[in-house]
Image: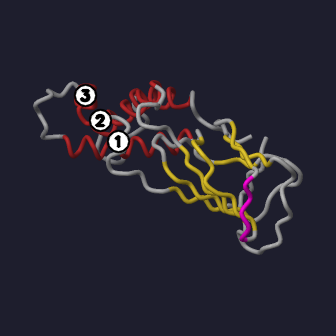
Amino acid sequence: MGYAPRQRIVSIEAAAAEAEVVSVADMRLHLRIDASDTSHDGFIADCEASAVNAVEKYTQRLLTKRTVTLSLPGLPFGRCPVELPGGRIASVTSVTIDGEDLADVSATGDAPAVLVPDADWPAVTGEGYPVTIVYEAGYAAGEVPPLLLTAVKLWTEDLFDRPESGSDGISMVLRRAMDLADLYRIRPA
């Protein structure tokens, strides 16, 4: 169990427009729409982007690689790990404490990922959020696990087939998507 204070600020870079998790062509195939029928492509792309967002929120994992900035009011004592939101960590860009860079840290794991110092954490004296951790999190293109890809496809299908708001209950398609995504869900300790 790592240090994860409730008072923290997490800023996640917006996903690049070209960083689709499932292509529109693959979604057309999944939705059984003829490959030559591109009349729904805009709506499919919107549904896929919404589905990716929903799966990311549900699993607490970023499905595309992005920069994350975590601001904390302090640090734990000793070498207690600090939880890093976002799932898989590609690299830690910087750790700044009271305006000073700290280089001797390493990130490990992904459910949740944690940041561990090589020695005890330094004392934090600043006010507000004097600790800033910048890192790259998420899956690289082509590395999203197949079950999460299927969850995105099913969630997109649900949005595509039921675009109206206020529908009653959770559809079987959405239930299957959530069941698959649940296998990758990061739960608080």
Is 127 situated above or below 13? below
Tell me which label, 2 or 3, sits earlier in the chain: 2
Quadrant hosting residue 156: top left
Provide the residue designation for mark 1: 20
Closest to the camera, between mark 2 and mark 3, is 2
Quadrant hosting residue 89: top right
Do residues under tags 1 and 2 come within 8 Å of each other at their CB atoms? yes
- Distance of mark 1 from mark 2, alpha carbons? 6 Å
For label 2, the SS is: loop
81 left or right, relative to 38: right
Residue displayed at 23% across by 32% down: 25
The image shows residue 88 at horizontal and vertical percentages of 58, 39
Closest to the camera, between mark 3 and mark 1, is 1
Q: Amino acid at mark 1?
A: Glu
For label 3, the SS is: loop
40 left or right, relative to 20: left
Do residues under tags 3 and 1 come within 8 Å of each other at their CB atoms? no
Provide the residue designation for mark 3: 31
Tell me which label, 3 or 1, sits earlier in the chain: 1
Q: Amino acid at mark 2?
A: Ser
Residue displayed at 51% across by 27% down: 179
Provide the residue designation for mark 2: 23
Q: Amino acid at mark 3?
A: Leu
For label 1, the SS is: loop
Q: Is 86 or 187 nearer to us in this picture?
A: 86
